[in-house]
Amino acid sequence: MQDNFFARKRINTLLFCFLMLVITMVSIIATDYDVIRGFTSIPKAAEWAFGNFYPNEKALSRLPDIVNSLIETLLVSIASTIVAAIFALLFAIAGSHTTGMGGLISWISRSIATLFRNIDVAAWSMILLLSFGQNVLTGYFALFFGSFGFLTRAFTESIDEVSNSSVEALRATGAGYWSIIAHSVIPSSIPQLLSWILFMIETNIRQATLIGILTGTGIGFLFSLYYKSLNYNSASMVVIVIVCAIIVIESVSNYVRKVIM
Amino acid sequence: MTTLLEFKQVSKQYGADTRALSNVNFTVKQGEFVSIIGPSGAGKSTLLRCINRMIDASGGEIMFEDSNIMGLNKRGLKQLRSQIGMVFQHYNLVDRLSVIENVLHGRLGYKSTLEGVLGLYSKEEKRRAYTILKTLGLEEQIYKRCDQLSGGQKQRVGIARALVQDPKMLLCDEPIASLDPNASIIIMNHLRDICTTMGITVIVNLHQVEVALKYSDRILGVNKGSVIYDGPPAGIKREQLTRIYGSEIEEHIGELEKQHAG
Ligand SMILES: Nc1ncnc2c1ncn2[C@@H]1O[C@H](COP(=O)(O)OP(=O)(O)OP(=O)(O)O)[C@@H](O)[C@H]1O
Ligand SMILES: [Mg+2]
């Protein structure tokens, strides 16, 4: 019986490995992927990158332009996140189990948040491109809608997790609804809320770069411009600036998190 | 002494088949110290929460100061709750705020929406909060964050929050169930003191029979949603405990005999 158990387990593992192998083979054949050439081209790609994809002096002279559009991208990300956070907080309060008004209002606010959350930021910017065109506003609203959906969900969970018991106590003193929000719900959950906002800003800065390529704004646009005009030196400069910016933002937000927790 | 609270045929039904209270009748006089005892699930918490309408009773009448609280509108309810302080087993403080802020929360029931949201407390209210904290021995903790306090200190903050309401009545749901014996004695002494010197009526849910007998003017024994015993502590004997606690009886009788011996 015991022997049988282990033997069966081994056979299952073998079967699983075999299946994976078959799937891989089929995919390779179906896509005409040459495994050997795939691997041998890695050194070549690296060689090309080292040969072309580095900043030179001319790229350095473009630094002010690059930094300017980086700042634009940063500001759009931060602004959209903050505004989204304000709306998300209202919706989270209305939709949460602890503080919700219950019934229809809660349901509506949760549904709206779910809808917004399930449409990707890239999809939002495609949709909005139609109404706003290639414009900063397009990127701004795309980020806003995406962040709003995500933050509402995150805020709702934080509020429900944190403030149950003190809400009961304040209700028992006769405190009004908004007083309870202001003195119990918000103070209890503020570290989590801030932490989510910081996370969202980080994510949005990364997303904004991509969206910029689509909407023709900010640092993403600059990258695609240089790249398409075969100015690889300047394009590499853009990448380096983005990486530096993200590292700085991340360490700042980690520091802030440590302080507020 | 005048009657402060009266239950007339009060019942509470949760869903279709849980009857938490059935035809409960009792009165509480002003300045009394009443303990409610009974096995787990007897309906003690439900009974207590019906008094300030944290739970709405399903039937009967609850009279507080001669007016039926069952029919109160939103405004009346706010006024009722501001006159009744509540103390919880798990303290229910806002842990990230300071002691004094938590205590001042007790005043929110008296505020308009705007005043409440902005937390506009008068000088007088702050002074009162300070005095109460001093009486409860929390002078040195006033500006500390509540998550830095011990359980006993947290419970005293909870009591201070209730007292700053200037309540006519204090409802305490298992106030010492999460505390060690020493902290429990301190809390019970404070509650007794509040009742005796400030004249505030106190109703306490308790698991510990011996504590209930020692501190109370009157005992309400509850089992399966009905009041089985309503009388002085002296009237609680082995027979009454058997009726209140049913099968859980043995551990409580042990406590009772310990106390008679001691
Ligand atoms: N919100 C609720 N929904 C449904 N049933 C409930 C609810 N709250 C309490 N009950 C039920 O009502 C009965 C009384 O509960 P209650 O909490 O009043 O008991 P208790 O005497 O306070 O118990 P304990 O000593 O364990 O705190 C129990 O059977 C419980 O399961
Ligand atoms: Mg209980």
Image: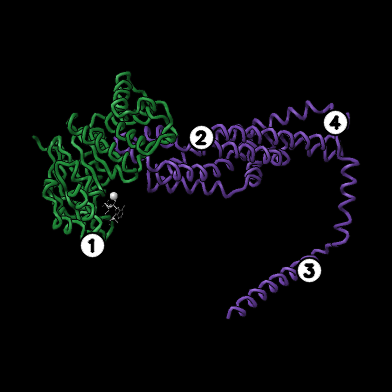
Q: The residue under label 2 is which amino acid type?
A: Ile
Percent x, y of residue B238: 15, 56
* Scheme of colours in the image: by chain
| Residue A148 appearing in the image | yes
Q: Are marks 3 and 4 on the same chain?
A: yes
Q: The residue under label 4 is which amino acid type?
A: Ala
Left or right: A207 in relation to B192: right
Mark 4 sits on what residue? A59
The CA span between labels 1 and 2 is 55 Å
In the rendered image of the structure, the colour used to display chain A is: purple
Question: In percent of the image, x 66 and y 33: which residue is there?
Answer: A249
The CA span between labels 3 and 4 is 44 Å
Percent x, y of residue B29: 12, 38
Which of the chains bears the disc numbered 3? A
Looking at the rendered structure, the secondary structure element under dot 1 is helix
The answer to which quarter of the image holds residue A19 is: bottom right
Q: Is mark 1 within 8 Å of ligand 1?
A: no
Mark 1 sits on what residue? B247
Q: Residues within 10 Å of mark 1 (few under 14, many from 20)?
A: few
Q: Are marks 3 and 2 on the same chain?
A: yes
Mark 3 sits on what residue? A25
Q: How many marks?
A: 4
N-terminal of the pair, mark 3 or mark 2, is: 3
Q: Are marks 3 and 1 in contact (CB under 8 Å)?
A: no
Q: Residues within 10 Å of mark 4 (few under 14, many from 20)?
A: some
